[in-house]
Amino acid sequence: MTDAAAPRKQRRQVVLLRPVPGKTVIHDLWAGSKLLIVAGIGVLLTFYPGWVPIGAVAVLILVAARLAHIPRGVLPTVPRFLWVLLALGALTATFAGGSPIIPLGSIDLGLGGLLNFLRITALSIVLLGLGAMVSWTTNVAEVAPAVATLGRPLRPLRVPVAEWAVTLSLALRAFPMLFDEFRVLYAARQLRPKDVDTTRGGRWRHWASELIDLLAAAITVALRRADEMGDAITARGGAGQISAAPTRPKRRDWVAFAVVVVVCGAALALELTVLGTSGTRR
């Protein structure tokens, strides 16, 4: 078989809000513990987005992925245009200059802008990794009871914690389902014969008509799925049952809290003392 006839490598799609099957210590952590850890790390990286905290969090993510037996196949294929955008962003950020400065003959090249761009890129990747780890190791059904338990102190203030938890759970359940439905609709639309129009105005009208038809079909599918989900919730006892399951942190959750606090605390101490990068504080 020649290279031209060889099949193209299929791209891996984004896999989110669907836990990777398995029974590991990361899967068994309470959903509320994962949410608190992600929130705490997010606050740390917001106020101290230095290289040391970013590296420490990246190590935590890699260790957690190893313990959870996350396969490489869940990682999506990065499109080529994204690499081009990153290269273009790095090139334009280099023009900002700043220390450190490297002399190249008669030209002084400042790498400060490039390092800041790389740091922001690494921060974005780490935050995406945190969200992905929670998605790959947490069942959606466990999120609503965890949110209801975490928000219990707000109930005396008449905050509708249970309703918020149910809304969040339904949104997390519906998102992957609707994503698959929209992808099927788009694929079915692509199979329909296309009208050939040589004029630019005709092509624009045809494109607008296609978009309107696709949006109408998507809204119809979303309403049908919402009706089916409502019937299923009613048959199982109502929306209150979604957040009614009692959940609490266990011993392994406190161990996870301790590990995260020690690692992040050590990284913050190094960032503020040994490395002296307090200038990166926002």
Image: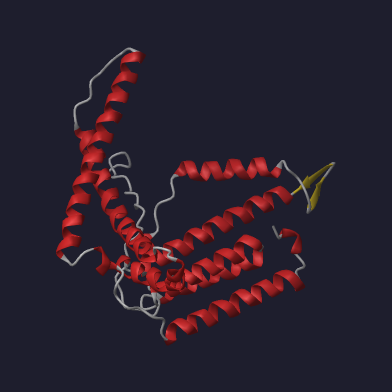
Position of the C terminus by quadrant: bottom right
Residue 263 x %, y %: 59, 77
280 vs 144, nearest the viewer: 144
Residue 259 x %, y %: 54, 81
Asked if 223 appears above or below 35 in the picture, the reply is above
Asked if 262 appears above or below 84 in the picture, the reply is below
Q: Is residue 246 something that shows in the picture?
A: yes
Using residue 19 as the reference point, say whether residue 128 is left or right of it. Answer: right
Write the residue at 44% across / 81% down: 253
Number of marks drawn: 0
The quadrant holding residue 24 is bottom left
Using residue 207 as the reference point, say whether residue 128 is left or right of it. Answer: right
Asked if 236 appears above or below 185 in the picture, the reply is below
Residue sitting at the far right:
106
Structure colour scheme: secondary structure
Residue 125 x %, y %: 52, 57
The quadrant holding residue 124 is bottom right
Write the residue at 73% across / 70% down: 272
202 vs 196, nearest the viewer: 202
Residue sitting at the far top:
199
Residue 87 x %, y %: 58, 44
Asked if 266 appears above or below 58 in the picture, the reply is below
Q: Is residue 49 something that shows in the picture?
A: no
